[in-house]
Image (spheres, grey):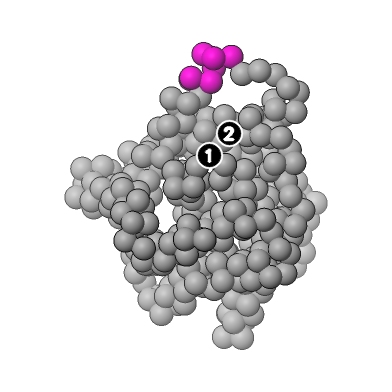
Amino acid sequence: MIEIFLQALPFFLLIAIGYGAAATGFFGPEATVYLTKFVFFFALSAMLFRFSSSLALNEVFDLNFGLAYLLACLTVYAIFMGVALALRKGWSEAAIEGQCAIIGNNGFLALPLLISLMGEVAAAPAMFVLVIDLIVFGSLAVVFITADRQGSVSVNALAQIGLGLLKNPMVMSMALGLTWSYLGIEMPRAADDFLRILGSAATPCALFAIGASLAGKSAERFGTAVWLSFGKLIVHPAVVAFFALWVFDVEPFAAGVMIATAAMPAAGNIYIIAQHYGVAPARVSSAILISTVASVVSLTVVLGWILGG
């Protein structure tokens, strides 16, 4: 376990450095925004395109894997939405709390961390998880909030969600990479070197940006935030493990990657949705902060279990 912690420690230290730089004012909010844009639109997209362009479609999309992750997430989502509704919270708030319990920081944290610890073979299952999160669960909260406020979900609202997905650089880069692979085009050496160099900036910059963004978060609504962090760090990976290992019998290595991604702390994009729609942004901010700090311990335990066989 200590060995796993030491392997993961540099990643957490990069987050801590980003937090310190922002908390002291050395790295301002505007700088954090632009660094995040660089990672999102350039470095991470280059990494995803490079990995996906070398993969066959059947290496990424596995039916048992997809069903295991999808059903596990829906189960956890339903549990946390149900608890919120039982506490007489609105459907919009319940949807946001459901998001906090299942959407992890898979693009900025899981992908680089798992590739570093488990090798590039971890890229395919990690990207499949990312695809499900972006397409299915990234849209689900918006659907619930829209239906709650308007009484129904219009065709225009669904079209806007679809357009947003098409414009998402992570979705675009993976789609283009898989298309490149399907067409069987050999990647020129210079292009591969360019993508490798640009993609290698994703890991340090993404982790620094995570830390810098946490400096603006506060621990309000502490009790609810702890509950949501418990859901994300403990309940989510446990339910995913149950579905992957005992219900669908997913191949062990792929199952390990799936469980590890489920153990990631709550993602920052939930806060963007919460803030945009004015639905419990302080609560989400707290959940992101607490789950990220607590993941230093919980994620180490989960990774130790997975890497230990």
Asked whether disc 2 touches disc 1, contact meaning CB atoms under 8 Å apart, the reply is: yes
* Rendered residue at 43%/62% (across/down): 304
The structure residue drawn at horizontal position 68% and vertical position 38%, both measured from the top left corner, is 166
Name the residue carrying label 2.
51
| Magenta stretch bounds | 188-194
Where residue 104 appears, as percent x and y from the top left, is: 52, 58
Question: How many numbered badges does the structure rendering display?
Answer: 2
Quick check: is 237 in the magenta stretch? no
Q: Which residue is drawn at 47% across and 61% down?
A: 308
Residue 7 visible in the snapshot: yes
Percent across and percent down for residue 43 are 47, 32
Percent of width and height locating residue 135 = 68, 50
Q: 10 Å neighbourhood of mark 1: few (<14), some, or many (≥20)? A: few
For the N terminus, the image quarter is: bottom left
Under mark 2, the amino acid is Phe
Instruction: Determine which residue is flagged by label 1.
Output: 120
Picture disc at residue 252: none
- State how far apart marks 2 and 1 are (Cα): 8 Å
Q: Which amino acid does label 1 sit on?
A: Glu
